[in-house]
Image: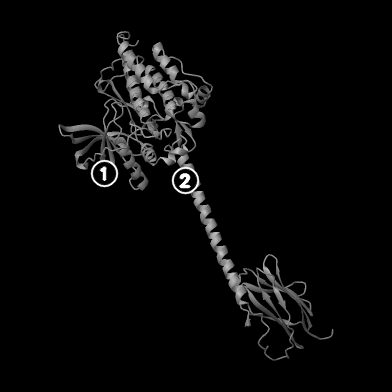
Amino acid sequence: MLSAAPKIVELKVTKNFYWCINYRITGFPKPYRTWYFNNQPLQNPIIQDLENAFTMKNSYLADGCLQLERASQVNEGLYTLIATNSLGTVNYSIEAKFHKDPVLIAHPTFIPQGRIPPPISTIIQKQPELEKKDKTLILVSVLLTVAVVVVLVVTVVCVVQWKKYQNSPDAPNARTSPWFFFCPQRRRNRLLRERIPLYPSQMVVNHNYCKESNDNKEFNIEIHHIAREKISFVQTLGEGAFGRVFLGTVDYLTPDEPTTLVAVKTLKDTNFSDAKVDFEREAELLTNMQHDNIIKFYGVSTDGEAPMMIFEYMEHGDLNNFLRDRSPNTENSDTAGHKYANLSIPDLIHISCQIAGGMDYLASQHFVHRDLATRNCLVADNLIVKIGDFGMSRDVYSTDYYRVGRHNMLPIRWMAPESILYRKFTIESDIWSFGVVLWEIFSFGKQPWYELSNHEVIQQVTSEKILPRPPSCPEDIYHVMLECWKTRPQERTPMKIIHTQLQLLTTSRDTEYLEVVD
């Protein structure tokens, strides 16, 4: 075979799986290859000169590529291939930009054997203006990418938190009227009222009332602070998601009373600022809730480790257990072994009238209870009944609630059709619940629809089925229930009228219902 000087037939940049500078060299004897990068010998472990296996044994042809596994801006620049054999040397240079079309610069130069290659003077100089534009574009791209990522992260976090809030028991289900945002005074009152802790699902303000009225004045009663050293704990009454409730005493709660028996509600999550804010809002709201049939709030104690709320103690516990213990079908007795006295029809009407009075007050203040039931009413001596519990009823009466999602537990058996179907809670839906409470009272604490599952209850209520009249319930009381269970919310009798009707029944029927319930 005839001898031939080296010749670089091809040199180009291509993108396969990796970036490559492909070359094709001819010559005999077979030339050997040397690479330069920006006029310096190429020494980079991630860049490999790979010759095609088909030409490795060929004595006059070399076909392969300079492979860059992780090509970046650092690797951009001038690459020079020098091919040398005994007859001479040839070199080709190429400007490699891995994000732009490469520029091929062919400068064949014969270098006699044994001489050092001269400095390559044919390098394409980078234009400063183009380099500046490139840097600006890169900076803008990075900033835009960061901004988009931040917006996406914030959006995802907000959506997740909103979903959690919607699924939590604290989420208000009533829709907010647009007028709500134009009434800053009403908005402040609502934020306070949504946090009332007496009811597990918490009452919410009815935002259909935006105009100031005499019934809904700005809160102006100061919160009463009780020194921690005045409080003594007697025993645990129960525990809920918020914390614990204790039976305790307070020394000189009033100047003329050395010791007062109280219920003490503690705050569990003392490390969370949100919980403390809620605690303060609840205390401000409760201080201004003044009614004979709403549990009395004495004040707060915040100078200890855990903030506490102090309520009046209701000796006989919740109304549901009170009714069951005194049902004519049971033989329960108190701790002293004495059988509980049966309740007469006038007693049951008296209980109903007190709850109606409390609900009438809440309606006048534009509050929606959302979880009215006998389990959420408390009983004291002399058959005094008040609305209020300490957030424990969902733990004690778990079968009364229907779990929806991960967190929401709904009192389906007490809910109006529109509340079940649309999660719409209003004063009118509270009236429906009051009708169910009447049914509970005259059934001596039985669970509404006790023979049906929660799914069956939903089907019954949404198909306009109603609870039957309890055996011992007078017709006029059942008529009140029916007035509460009108399908159209606006047709339900207002709570004020219901309260008046029950007051009349309490006074006019005492002589009619003298006998004890059989």
Residue 274 shows in the view = yes
Residue 23 shows in the view = no
Disc 2 marks which amino acid?
Answer: Gln
Q: Which quadrant: the N terminus?
A: bottom right
Residue 350's x, y, as percent? 31, 18
What is the spatial separation of the Cα atoms under label 2 and label 1, in whole angstroms?
29 Å
Residue 68's x, y, as percent? 65, 71
Q: Nearer the viewer, residue 13 or 349?
A: 349
Q: Residues within 10 Å of mark 2 (few under 14, many from 20)?
A: few
Element type where label 2 sits in the image: helix
Disc 1 marks which amino acid?
Answer: Thr
Q: Nearer the viewer, residue 318 or 131?
A: 131
Badge 2 is on which residue? 161
The tag earlier along the polypeptide, 2 or 1, is 2
Badge 1 is on which residue? 302
Q: In this figure, what is the number of numbered marks?
A: 2
Residue 430's x, y, as percent? 42, 26
Residue 510's x, y, as percent? 30, 11
Q: Can you tell which quarter of the image residue 64 is in?
A: bottom right
